[in-house]
């Protein structure tokens, strides 16, 4: 017994000092790496699961193709400026952790890459069409994980200006006018842009159509004409609406923003666009996998 014990000690001690040191370094490295991975996973989950009150997002609204100014209302027209018709929308989004900027130079000059959401709105693009180069920049932005809001309008409006953008995502704007002009509808699917939303209001909207990768999510209940669509494209998301004025507020004669559940609809829409679903799922899955403890081995 003593011989065997002595022999065992010789075999164990046959490991060189260098091998022993290397084994200890590797073990320590693995332990430290494991701790760092767990800490990183916890941070990822913290960011994803923390209430939106501590998160902030950025929006870039394009006005480079000409802003329509109503002869009746004056002001800065359909843009989110201090005297613009989307001022109330911008303020409401600001109260819900969004910062709204505008670009009068366009997406080729002001790169949207540092923003979460970009807006292509007909009434803010009333006098010229998006070029092929601009469309390519927008498509790249969405494909890389950005959110895009497209807002068209009734049939007589120049929807052709923004149709090149919409077409890239399977959406066709302004198929026909939706009558009556006052559209108060609860006709919508169970989709995140309608979180907390029962009814939405649009005025003088136009019917749109959607084909892959887009699909319709809201319609006028009487005519069943589609008035909203969404699309998943690459790592990003797209929302298209058949009306550009549902979130406008000029004065007491055009108080549309606070009609029905439009304020919540705005927040839910921009929230949906701000964080692409595939990225969220990837990070959540990574965090869950890294945090999962190893089961102890059976003796």
Image (cartoon, helix red, strand yellow):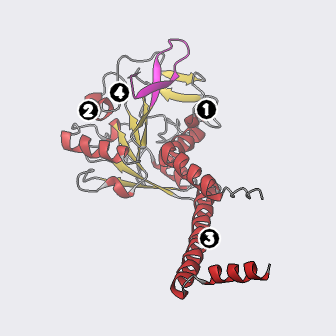
Which residue lies most toward the bottom here?
17
> Is label 2 in contact with label 1 (beta carbons under 8 Å)?
no
Name the residue carrying label 3: 35
Pick whichever, 126 or 100, lies toward us.
Answer: 100
Residue 44's disc number: none
Tell which circle, 2 or 4, labels the residue nearer the N-terminal end: 2
- Residue 244: give x, y in percent of width and height: 41, 34
Instruction: Tell me which segment is drawn in magenta.
Output: 210-230
Sort mark 1 into few (<14), some (14-19) or many (20+) by Cα contacts within 10 Å. some
Q: CA distance from mark 2 to mark 4?
A: 10 Å
Cα separation between marks 4 and 1: 29 Å
Q: Residues within 10 Å of mark 3 (few under 14, many from 20)?
A: few
Residue at 58% of width from left, 51% of height from top? 284
Label 4 sits on residue: 170
Question: Of label 4 and label 3, which has the lower sequence position?
Answer: 3
Residue on which disc 2 sits: 164
Secondary structure under tag 2 reads helix
**Mark 1 = which residue?**
260
């Amino acid at each position: 017994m003593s011989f065997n014990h002595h022999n065992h000690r010789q075999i164990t001690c046959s490991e060189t000092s260098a091998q022993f040191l290397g084994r200890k370094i590797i073990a320590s490295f693995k332990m430290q790496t494991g701790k760092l991975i767990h800490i990183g996973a916890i941070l990822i989950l913290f960011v994803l699961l923390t209430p939106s009150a501590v998160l902030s997002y950025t929006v870039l609204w394009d006005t480079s193709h000409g802003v329509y100014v109503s002869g009746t209302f004056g002001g800065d027209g359909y843009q989110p400026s201090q005297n613009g018709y989307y001022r109330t929308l911008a303020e409401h989004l600001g109260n819900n952790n969004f910062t709204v900027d505008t670009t009068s130079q366009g997406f080729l000059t002001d790169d949207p890459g540092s923003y979460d959401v970009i807006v292509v709105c007909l009434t803010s693009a009333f006098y010229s069409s998006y070029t092929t180069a601009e469309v390519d920049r927008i498509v790249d932005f969405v494909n890389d994980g950005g959110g895009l809001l497209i807002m068209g309008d009734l049939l007589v409006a120049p929807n052709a200006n923004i149709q090149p953008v919409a077409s890239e995502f399977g959406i066709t704007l302004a198929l026909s006018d939706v009558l009556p002009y006052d559209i108060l509808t609860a006709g919508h699917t169970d989709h995140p842009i309608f979180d907390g939303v029962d009814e939405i209001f649009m005025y003088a909207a136009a019917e749109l159509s959607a084909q892959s990768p887009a699909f319709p999510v809201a319609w006028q209940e009487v005519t069943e004409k589609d008035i909203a669509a969404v699309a998943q494209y690459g790592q990003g998301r797209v929302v298209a609406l058949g009306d550009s004025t549902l979130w406008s507020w000029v004065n007491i004669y055009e108080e549309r923003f606070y009609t029905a559940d439009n304020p919540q609809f705005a927040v839910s829409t921009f929230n949906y666009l701000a964080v692409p679903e595939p990225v969220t799922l990837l990070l959540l899955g990574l965090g869950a996998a890294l945090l999962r403890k190893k089961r102890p081995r059976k003796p």
